[in-house]
Image (cartoon, rainbow, N blue to C red):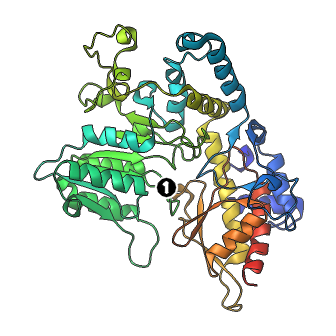
Amino acid sequence: MDQFVGSTPRDTLERVSALLGHSPTSAQVASYLDEHDELRHLREEFLVPKVADLPTSDLSLADGTKDCVYFAGNSLGLQPRRVKKYLDEELDKWAKTGVHGHTEGSRPWAWAENNMEDLMANIVGAKSEEVALMNGLTVNLHLLLLSFYKPTATRHKILLEDKAFPSDHYAVESQIRLRGLDPKDSMLLLSPRPGEETLRTEDILEVVEKEGEAIAVVMLSGVQYYTGQLFNMEAITAAGHSKGCYVAFDCAHAAGNAELRLHDWGVDFACWCSYKYLNSGAGGIAAAFIHERHSHTVKPALLGWWGHDLKTRFQMSNVMELQPGVSGFRLSNQPILLVCPLQASLEVFNMTSMQALRRKSLLLTGYLEYLIQHYYTEDPAQPHKPHVRVITPSDPLQRGCQLSLRFSVPIGKVFHELEKRGVACDMREPSVLRVAPVPLYNSFSDVYRFIETLGMALTASRQ
């Protein structure tokens, strides 16, 4: 793909089209892009479900022997092939050695997750000591807010999106109540301008400038789950710091999707799950980040023995030797059967770089957007023809790989017809279909098949 670096997706498609003598919308263009994709071999590291294996497929409408079109990595990533091998290794070790597995083998259970933190740190642009693998996302968010959210009479607000992911909203609301405050007074919610779907960066910065003296924590998504908008985390962090606020991000939809630099941007803290773009399986181990400048100044409010220094942890002295930074926020040992899938996925990420994945992602999602606009843009000359509107920002710098789609026909019917034809994506209430071509394992031919199948689904949904 190096030959296309610096070109817009449209420019690239038109160049390939001219080279091949075929329309940019032709299958030949998709095949050419796949042939010249230096990351295409990574798909072989994952198990892609067959159409026949999806419980929603109708085999009278789709070829059951084909791989499905899997565009649901923003909800649950595909299974890395190495997962079963690693799980079998640990089950075998447990069966044969019992308690000795805590300190023996290739991944001793007592510190197995520590061996992967450098891989995770590379993905989010952090130092290894700034990242901990532990708990679930919402648990980590609570632990971090307990330490960073210290409201005063004048600085007590938490800023977040009006339509933040429910877990974030509930966590913030409950943390405010825990301090004896009222969310109506202390939750500051950001909404798009009337008639718009996404937040403008200048509007976010304006609110921070105006309300900053009263804001204790700016707590936003990295990528907004519903609209797919990628926030300007660097600018938001700088704005928050200029007003004395802590700045944090829920990176559930950003980690493994966007190119992050949590350390360089100076983000105070962040957390994310690992089962979406990081492919660790449902309920996989989450992660947390605390910037190194807080290593000795921000302490955990709740302590567990896994926050104790590993060198003396098993002396059981009951005198806490707290690990600095995010490591001190650990509570308990991590389930080894959840460590294995995450290790399998992080090793695949380590075969490439976030820069390379992002380059492919820009073209892959741009190709999807190009085809949607070509075939399904609203046409006043054909008022009864179904059309699709992309609500995700058109600027590639303001989105990850996901496009959120709205339809002129009932979305439930479209979704159902796509599922029957072997497409895995997801619908989010009230009216959005989220489609995420993941550069780690999706192809340009997947995009072409999706668009082809979408046409069939739109036709069937009108019948």
314 lies above or below 78: above
Dot 1 falls on a residue whose secondary structure is loop
In screen coordinates, is 247 left or right of 178?
right
Q: Which residue is mark 1?
A: 230
Residue at x 62%, y 79% (from the top left corner): 410
Residue at image x 69%, y 67%? Answer: 370
Q: Amino acid at mark 1?
A: Leu
Q: Is residue 60 left or right of residue 145?
A: right
From the viewer's side, name the closer residue of 71 and 394: 71
Quick check: can you spot residue 11? yes
Near-viewer residue (378 or 92): 92
Give the x, y percent position of residue 409: 64, 81
Q: Is residue 354 above or below residue 443?
A: above
Q: How would you rate the neighbour count of disc 1 (Cα within 10 Å): few for under 14, some for 14-19, many for 20 or more?
A: many
Location of residue 354 in the rendering, given as x and y in whole percent from the top left corner: 59, 39
Q: Confirm whether residue 243 shows in the render.
A: no
Q: Quadrant of residue 325?
A: top left
Quadrant of the frame with the C terminus: bottom right
The residue drawn where x is 27% and y is 14% is 318
Image height of 92 relative to 203, above or below: above
**Relative to 213, 422 lies left or right:** right
Q: Position of residue 429 (x, y in %)?
A: 52, 68
> Which residue is pictured at 54% across the width and 12% down the height?
99
Q: Position of residue 111 (x, y in %)?
A: 49, 18
